Image (spheres, rainbow, N blue to C red):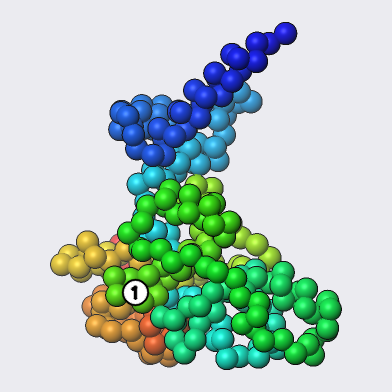
Amino acid sequence: MADPSSSDELGQRVWRFLRLLVTGRADEASLREQIEEAIDGREGEAENEDDLSAAERMMLRNLLHFGEREVDDVAVPRADMVAFEASGSFQDLVELFREAGHSRVPVFRNNLDDVIGMIHIKDVYARLAEDGRSAVVEPESLLRPVLFVPASMGVLDLLARMRHARTHMAIVIDEFGGTDGIVTIEDLVEEIVGDIEDEHDEAEEGLKALGDDMYEADARIELSELQATLGLDLADPDDEDEIDTVGGMVFMLAGRVPRVGETIVHQSGWRFEVIAGDARHIERVRIHPPEGFSREAAAE
């Protein structure tokens, strides 16, 4: 029969090891380096039943650096937030949940800098079940408290605060107290396991070919991915350290956020037509080749 005390001691050792990985205490640098070197050393080797899978290695690698991240690294920016105006009707709230496919939405008065709480879809469903779609409900009566956290907070501290407050959502505030973005438990988990897509997520490709050397791209894809596809260096040497995404490059070329329908021409002759976005950011672009472009000629 196994000794319970030895089992407890093993559990404590494992827990201390995991804490070292993510908290950055007690020789964490050498410990991280050793584990990362071990993972790198097995890269490309055939998997077997007793070894870590590629997915497990990826998650372990992400976990090694999880404690280095701050809230600002994982938050959804203000421009992409889905939120509800407190003066709206209950029917407006139901429609917002239907369109957004979220389980929680922050609620604000007048503007996003005045977030007063959040509403959980469970509470909306409960009222619908009781009174139907025509229910007369004041949305503010469904409010739940929400966390407010600075962008510079570490993600581990945020996890601890979320756990203590028993909430899955936090509003990120800037140095002036304004709303800078939003972060959820899902955002934090995705930093370890990768993107989690559900039935509500749009299955749009990051970069897809349209034929005739035209492409369509999510503005958030890495510029390096597009450059590899086109076989072309698009970044200006003076700005390459500041540009990571296709949208960032288009913004730098225009010197502002281009309007939907506007086309920005790169010095190489490639044209970037903004096909989705708003006054604050670019969402998708259609990429047109230069006039008279020939893939065969470009390859020579």
Most foreground residue, 299 or 37: 37
Towards the viewer: 54 or 17? 17
Residue position marked by numbered label 1 in the rendering = 177
Q: In the picture provided, is 131 more to the left or to the right than 95?
A: right
Find the residue positioned furthest to the front.
141
**Residue 47, position in %: x, y?**
57, 29
- In the rendered structure, the answer to whether residue 221 lies left or right of residue 15 reads left
Which image quadrant is residue 3 in?
Answer: top right
What x and y, as percent, mark residue 293?
Answer: 35, 76
Q: Residues within 10 Å of mark 1 (few under 14, many from 20)?
A: few
Tell me what residue is drawn at x 44 percent, y 54 percent.
Answer: 158
Vertical comparison of 38 with 169: above or below = above
Percent of width and height locating residue 249 = 30, 72
The residue lying at 32 percent from left, 59 percent from top is 152
Which residue ends up furthest to the left in the rendered image? 238
Q: Secondary structure at mark 1?
A: loop
Please, what is the three-letter code of the amino acid marked with disc 1?
Gly
Q: Seen in the image, is 71 located left or right of residue 190?
A: left
The extreme top residue here reads: 1
Report which quarter residue 233 is drawn in.
bottom left
Instruction: Please say whether residue 277 is visible from this viewpoint.
Output: yes
Q: Give the x, y percent position of residue 162.
A: 52, 55
Q: Is residue 229 above or below residue 100?
A: above
Identify the residue at horizontal 83%, vertical 83% (top origin).
Answer: 131
Residue at left 43%, top 48%? 156
